[in-house]
Image (spheres, grey):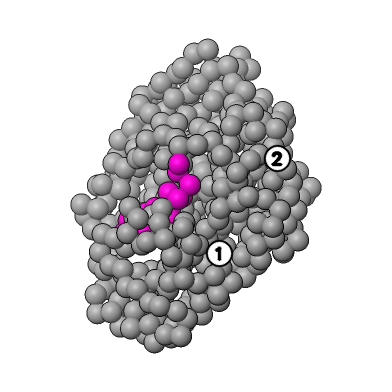
Amino acid sequence: MTTFTPTTSAETLSTIAWAAAEDSPLEILGHGSKRGIGRPQQSEHTLDLSNLSGVTLYEPAELVLSAKAGTPLAAIESLLAENGQQLAFEPMDYGPLLGGEPGRGTIGGVLAANLSGPRRLKAGAARDHILGIAAVSGRGEAFKSGGRVVKNVTGYDLSKLMANSWGTLAVFTDVTFKVLPAAETEVTLAIRGLLDDHATAAMALALGSSAEVSSAAHLPERVAARVAGGSLGSDAATLLRIEGFGPSVAYRIAALKDLLKNAGPLQEISGSVSYSVWRDIRDCAPFADGSERPVWRVSMAPSQGHLMVLELRMQAAVDAFYDWQGGLIWLRMQQDDPEAGLLRGLIRKYGGGHATLVRATPSHRAAVPVFESQAPPLAALSARLKAEFDPKNILNPGRMAPGAGSATLAPATEGGAQ
């Protein structure tokens, strides 16, 4: 087994062209922070992009940043913070959840997994902020899509098509993202002690108000103690984040308090504690326990999520917490099967959605469909895309589904994982 470590786009192109000519599968790797997501790899060689690194363009006044695909996300976030800017979709760091170090993700992996965070309600995911890419297909052909401006009319938007493909269609060499100013002030209003159904109602009420809530999450009893170093205590916490200029945030927090005065005890959280709470929700810190117990990422209608979890708890031992007003549910199972079939059956029962297995032992990931199966028309479209971009199935073969089905794209609503 050989590991290729290109330092330029040209070297990346030549490596993939060689692999295509030799019918030699490649595992596509940045720093490996998301290596444990998907089926175990079926590749003879590894294409390691960690040396394809560096910011190539940053124009703060134009809100545009370009970087080579292997550039560490932590370095980009640090650069943006120095200029009072951010990736507004706050991409998740999977490293700690999967037993790795924090801050090891790359900017190319952000788009490949279509990452997002708690602010997705307001800001969307990576695909909503990508402006352009340079990439190499599985045919060994270089191509570009998009550019460095927000309004760009260049034909098909391949940049967004590549989001959530997990390296099975093409390998990014350069990416360009839109960046945005960071909020001046962040305050979180917590309602304490609510059960899941009451929390769902309170979040819906807050999000339907004029308070411009940017994030809404619910941490059930005991789960709350696993974020921000335990500063929230163990009581259930229903969290509403308000961001913006100081006077505006103060006004909207006051309006929320008045709106929710009968919902339960209210607690105001600000400064570094508020930041830590949302960072830990983003990174699924409550379940980053160093174990390999299965963790599922479920996307479904917020109004139905707590009902699905309630029935699931009657049949299996599971911990859960809710992000995106409950549209995203993180589940930690106590054992492997039969939870996969049970979980997906309950999701269908409560209106449908998607479930992705983001952590499990290699044997479990090989035995269970990690990504949600697609409807036949969508699966046929995915197969045609795979045939166009990677006809020999050399890029991350088997990661998303066994055999030829490895072309299947993850549902766009999952983000990421992602």
- Amino acid type at image mark 2: Asp
Q: Nearer the viewer, residue 343 or 220?
A: 220
Q: Nearer the viewer, mark 2 or mark 1?
A: 2
Q: Position of residue 354 (x, y in %)?
A: 65, 53
What residue is rendered at 58% in x and 32% in y? 361
The one of 269 and 300 positioned closer to us in this rendering: 269
Q: Looking at the image, which residue is at 25% across and 67% down?
A: 184
Name the amino acid, label 1.
Answer: Gly
The part of the image, by quadrant, that contains residue 353 is bottom right
Circle 1 Cα neighbour tier, 10 Å, few/some/many (<14 / 14–19 / ≥20): many
Q: Which SS type dominates the magenta stretch?
A: helix
Residue at (26, 73) in percent of width and height: 245
Q: Is residue 381 visible?
A: no
State whether residue 243 is above or below residue 248.
Answer: above
Mark closer to the chain start, 2 or 1:
1
Marks 2,1: beta carbons within 8 A: no
Q: Which span is picked out in magenta?
A: 275-289
Instruction: Relative to 117, say whether 168 is above or below.
Output: above
The residue at which mark 2 appears reads as 337
**Which percent across, then down, holds residue 225?**
40, 56
Left-right relation of 258 to 144:
left
How many other residues sit within 10 Å of disc 2, few (<14), some (14-19) or many (≥20)? some
In the picture shown, does residue 239 fall above or below 127? below
Location of residue 308 in the rendering, given as x and y in whole percent from the top left corner: 67, 61
Q: Circle 1 sits on which residue?
A: 326
- In the rendered image, residue 279 lying in the magenta stretch gets the answer yes
Residue 72 visible, this angle? yes
Give the farthest residue toward the left. 82
The alpha-carbon separation of the residues under discs 2 and 1 comes to 25 Å
The answer to whether residue 377 is magenta is no
Q: Quadrant of residue 302?
A: bottom right
